[in-house]
Amino acid sequence: MEQDPKSYATPLLESPLSGTTSKLQTLGNIIVSIVGTGVLGLPFAFRIAGWLAGSLGVSIVGMTTYYCMLLLVLCREKLAADGSSVEAKTYGDLGYKSFGSIGRYLSEFLILVAQSGGSVAYLVFIGQNLQSIFLNHGLAFTSYIFLLVPVEIGLSWIGSLSALAPFSIFADICNVLAMGIVAKEDIQQALRGEFSFEQRTAITSNLGGLPFAGGMAVFCFEGFGMTLALENSMQDRAKFPRLLAQTFGGITLVYILFGFFGYMAYGDETRDIVTLNLPRNWSSRVVQIGLCLGLVFTFPIMVHPINEIVEGKLKRLKWFYRPCHWDNNDSTTRLGKTWIYMSRAIVVVVLAILASCVPAFGVFASFVGSTVCALISFVLPATFHLKLFGSSLHLWQKALDFIVLFCGLFFAVYGTYNTIVGV
């Protein structure tokens, strides 16, 4: 069944209401999109890299991510100015206009892998925290993951993401509470004199720890794929770059302070999820349970782009489309809905199986950040910018794009190697 190339776009970055969001609402959306569970792994990254190297790494990653987000906006504006027939709402659209069908498929594949990696990280995070909370019940880490499967399958069948959106905000509130409790523990230990500043490593002597920590930092700036949707939803788009810069500056500073204080508090005992270092009291358990509940209900939001891609591919298969859709319109038949429910259940089960094989949250988060997140966040935006603007770019712009491009590739390869062989 032949379709127009425009119909191949998966609405990963679409905004339901274009140009209706205020500055304050956009600020909130940026924070919710970027800040996630990765922040709770930053103290561990600072332990691996050292507090000075970790701070510099987070700063560089934050500035580079901001620059590459602006490149995506510039590429979309370039296509609109040229009167392109394909409206750039997705990574796939930019990939298609830059490199044809191969560019679209490669972009969507990387997004599929990145979303899968983020979803697996959610399950690992929940499993490790539940195992810590119910330590005396004797259940293995994998048992908690598979106990979640029926719940997540049921939530994945909910058609409206807006019904789940409040839980995403709830999860971020729990993140803030967890960060606050860690900071409180750090201050209490400092007042008791239980550590000295000189006992903490500034820059690690193990160079392999630097790309590992860098991968964790890249993973922390999740939500990169929402760039175009966030910009498109804002009432005054001209103010988006400045608002994005201010928000990124604030988030980067918070990340640095949290990673620094978390490492200072626990030193070499810092766990890959810093909430596991918290004392076993009621306040810590409430925060951990709140984090787990929030992620349980936001997991379907992470999986949603995966389902969109899978179902989009299924609809282009003749053997699936003909018996599952009415001939007169594109309405899905009962058989079609059954297939969709089955595909979503299979996606959840596959992700749970992958999560059960992950050794630790920190290692996996760094691996995802070093590979697909680095490619999506740095390599693809720089490549699209170079391709679409071509000779119109100044020499310094080309040089900067090539630096980002090659550093992103090198970081992806070297960081992946170090994550696999172990730090």
Image: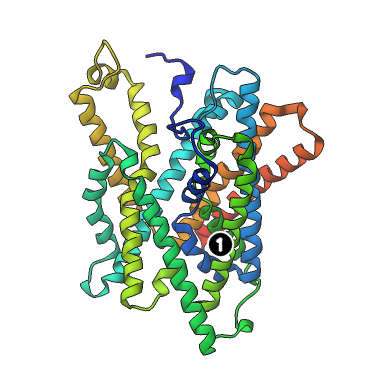
Q: Position of residue 122 (x, y in %)?
A: 38, 54
Q: Where is residue 418 in the image (x, y as percent from the top left)?
A: 56, 59
Q: Which residue is drawn at 56% across and 23% down?
A: 100
- The answer to whether residue 194 shows anywhere in this view is no
Q: Where is residue 284 in the image (x, y as percent from the top left)?
A: 36, 72
Question: Which quadrant of the structure image shows residue 331?
Answer: top left
Q: In the image, what residue type sits under mark 1?
A: Tyr
Task: Compare residues 143 and 236 and report the one nearer the observer.
Answer: 236
Q: In this view, does 53 lie to the left or right of 272?
A: right
283 to 366, vertically: above or below: below
25 to 388, vertically: above or below: below
| Residue that lies at the very extreme toward the right in this rendered image | 395
Q: Is residue 313 left or right of residue 46?
A: left
Q: Is mark 1 on a helix, strand or loop?
A: helix
Q: Find disc 1 in the rendering and name its residue.
A: 255
Q: Which residue is drawn at 52% across and 80% down?
A: 187
Task: Compare residues 376 and 33 and report the one nearer the observer.
Answer: 33
Task: Compare residues 289 and 48 and report the one nearer the observer.
Answer: 289
Count residues near mark 1 (Cα–Cα under 10 Å), then give few for <14, some for 14-19, many for 20+.
many
Q: Where is residue 89 in the image (x, y as percent from the top left)?
A: 51, 29
- The answer to whether residue 229 shows anywhere in this view is yes
Q: Say how many tags the image has.
A: 1
